[in-house]
Amino acid sequence: MDASAIEIIRKKLGLILTERYQEIFSTLRITEGDIEVPLDFIIDYMTSIFVGTLHWWLTAETTMTPDHLAKLVIKLVANGHLTVLGIEIEE
């Protein structure tokens, strides 16, 4: 994947996240000390995780299936990043 392809994927993924989870995102107010974390920062952070993981999967010599990769990403995000944001995921 070249840089332009990665940027296209990041932008499209950001749009999908924004549209699909608008209701959740609209209720978030995440702060670090006195600083509010901007929503566009959170979305960019999340898309970076997904795109980075996808890049690893495409370039690594792995036999991991797409389904297994998706489950691992969801597990990691749900147990870490979303918890920090105050979002609980039911299993």
Image (cartoon, rainbow, N blue to C red):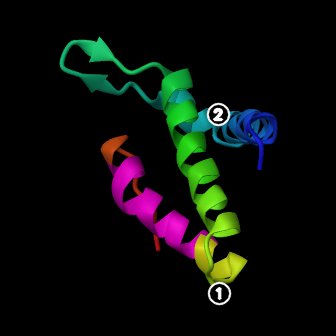
Would you place residue 72 above or below residue 55 in this image?
below
Q: How many labels were placed on the picture?
A: 2
Query: What kind of residue is marked 1?
Result: Thr
Residue range (magenta):
70-83
Near mark 2 (Cα within 10 A), the count class, few <14, some 14-19 or many ≥20, is few
Along the line of sight, which residue is nearer the eye, 24 or 53? Answer: 53
Q: Nearer the viewer, mark 2 or mark 1?
A: 1
Q: Position of residue 42 (x, y in %)?
A: 49, 31
Q: Position of residue 39 (x, y in %)?
A: 51, 24
Q: Is residue 82 magenta?
A: yes
Residue at figure coordinates x 57%, y 58% from the top left: 53
Residue hosting label 1: 63
**Residue at the top extreme?**
34
Q: Position of residue 90 (x, y in %)?
A: 46, 67
Q: Position of residue 30 (x, y in %)?
A: 35, 27
Q: Is residue 66 magenta?
A: no
**Whole-number angstrom distance, CA of label 2 to CA of label 1:** 35 Å
Task: Using residue 86 as the reference point, say whether residue 7 is left or right of it.
Answer: right
Residue at figure coordinates x 21%, y 12% from the top left: 34
Is there a contact, CB below 8 Å, between mark 2 and mark 1? no
Task: Using residue 8 as the reference point, say whether residue 45 is left or right of it.
Answer: left
Query: What kind of residue is marked 2?
Result: Gln
Task: Using residue 47 as the reference point, say whether residue 66 is left or right of it.
Answer: right
Near mark 1 (Cα within 10 A), the count class, few <14, some 14-19 or many ≥20, is few
Residue hosting label 2: 22
**Residue at the left extreme?**
33
Identify the mark nearer the N-term, 2 or 1. Answer: 2
Determine the secondary structure under disc 2.
helix
